[in-house]
Image (tube, rainbow, N blue to C red):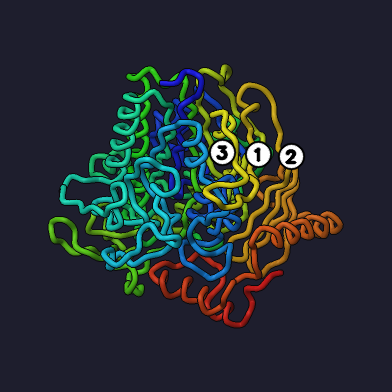
Amino acid sequence: MSENKPNIIIILADDLGYSDLGCYGSEIKTPNIDGLGNDGIKFSQFYNQARCSPSRASLMTGLTGHQAGVGQLSGDLGAPGYRGFINKECVTVAEVLKQESYDTYLSGKWHLGGSWDPREKDRWEAGTDNHPLPTQRGFDNFYGIMDAASSFFRPESLMDGDKFIDVDDPDYYFTDAMSDRACEMISGSMENDNPFFLYLSYTAPHWPLHAKPEDIAKYEGKYLKGWDHFRTARHEEMKGLGIIDSKWDISPRDSDVGDWEDAEYPDWEDSKMAAYSAMIDSMDQGIGRVIKTLRENNQLENTLIFFMSDNGGCAELMREDGDWSNTSQWETNTINGEPVRVGNIPNLRPGPGTTFQSYETPWTNVSNSPFRLFKRWIHEGGISAPLIVHWPSVIQEPRIESESIHIMDIPATSIEAAGGKYPSEYNGNKIKPIEGESFLPLLANKWSREKPMYWEHEGNQGIRKEEWKLVREFGKDWELYNMNEDRTELNDLSSTERDRVKEMSQEWKEWAKISNVLPWPVDPNVMAKRLEGDHSHIHQHRGPTAGQIAEGKGKFL
């Protein structure tokens, strides 16, 4: 094992909200992640790309999702920024680290290989330009799923290397399996003289709400105090921990959420949040096994670990009456031959593989406390997440850090830590210059980012420039906030800072023109199908409809 280069582990949670970790104010038990945070650096202003695959594209390449070809999801919308798979104008951090003699591993979710129909695995052209596999983009070994989500007890798109595999073990649980495979990858790397890079890409706590009974039992009955209680409790805990400034008032309860006292099925509501918490608990247990493996191999001191989430909590509702024509993997029988009931069906307790549910807006509002809105939006609830960095040999003083970090900064920091260089050409292809900025100096000293941060997702837009943030929802006016004074975005200053709004909105437009961001939607018919056909099983909390798109109301440039 090289003593000069650190091992690097990137751990990514899926749809984990800003306040869902114990060390960020939650009541959920996450002792292993908390240990990393309390012995390392907890970042209070870390930003992602608001949605799973664009965030993953940035995390792997150091570019915006649009620049890497993944500006929306995995569907191919026909424009360079919206192909749904990472292009050849970028390199992955794994490809760069391979040049520095790293062993490279991915355990978990890929979601950068385009769209496909799981019913036609035999016909799926895996490994083509439109369907790149992790093993073609720098990873020596891959275990996980190609798709966005699947059953945790019988994942349909599960692959080992470049081959699909079936699950026939009645005790199988995907979170455990990817954690255990990660430990095996680390142990296997010890036989070599190379440092290793591990991308541990969890699907927890993304829907469906699948969890083991023993983990659910830890939380049953806990949430009968209701969503307002836990939003307030987390907000107060975060203020006490120093994660947020006490002068930032909590945002009002979301307008789509009613009083807990009026909840028609309180026991069912409690069971949804119990299952969600259990999924996070199980992920934390797996991370504990990874830490144990590092410690047993005397590698913990010289391993740079990042932990983060790909977007804010997810307010999507699983509809019982959705169109399942393209989502058959979610309604297939379980290993034991039992049918799966799909949808948020009142009094159907989530957890087992015979259900397929989500935890919905009220509890998502808890996950994103104290912020507004959710996954897909550019307000703080959609793009803010925990970031923990742990590296004992470098980080001497554990602390909370308030410098703004973007998910595209993680590859830049990893590459610098490894002594690598982001190439201008790779495999005969010209490579876009990396957008992310390395914050490696901040781990031991000081650093501040040089460039603004920009966002676009499905017509929601934003720019953060020092303490100022300009943001707007699809179809609405720009809003302006001072993040130092009002990070919960309650005091819109756009009417009194018109010159700043004009200047920053123009900067956003200039960025969009050079970053593969096109007038949204790219194609009204394609996008309408994407939002309400392929995904008609999901109710998107607010947002545009197919009718609005067809009328041309999606265009913004």
Q: Position of residue 214 (x, y in %)?
A: 23, 40
Compared to residue 153, the image places residue 322 above or below, namely: below
Label 3, label 2: how far apart the Cα atoms are: 15 Å
The residue under the point 41% across, 46% down is 225
Number of other residues with Cα within 10 Å of mark 3, as a class: few under 14, some 14 to 19, many 20 or more: many
The residue under the point 50% across, 24% down is 5
Question: Which numbered disc flags the more N-terminal residue, 1 or 2?
Answer: 1
Q: Position of residue 17 (x, y in %)?
A: 49, 46
* Mark identifier at residue 450: 2
Q: Quadrant of the N terminus?
A: top left
Q: Position of residue 184 (x, y in %)?
A: 29, 32
Tell me which amino acid carries mark 2: Glu
Q: Can see residue 370? A: no
Label 1, label 3: how far apart the Cα atoms are: 8 Å
Q: Extreme front residue here?
A: 428
Label 1, label 2: how far apart the Cα atoms are: 8 Å
Q: Can see residue 162? A: yes
Q: Is residue 459 left or right of residue 356?
A: right
Callout 1 touching callout 2 (CB < 8 Å): yes
Q: Quadrant of the C terminus?
A: bottom right
Count of picture labels = 3
* Mark identifier at residue 297: none
What residue did someone put label 1 on? 437
Q: Extreme right residue here?
A: 499
Tell me which amino acid carries mark 1: Glu
Under circle 3, the secondary element is helix
Question: Which numbered disc flags the more N-terminal residue, 3 or 2?
Answer: 3
Compared to residue 169, the image places residue 444 above or below, namely: above
Q: Position of residue 72 (x, y in %)?
A: 53, 62
What residue did someone put label 3 on? 410
Tell me which amino acid carries mark 3: Ile
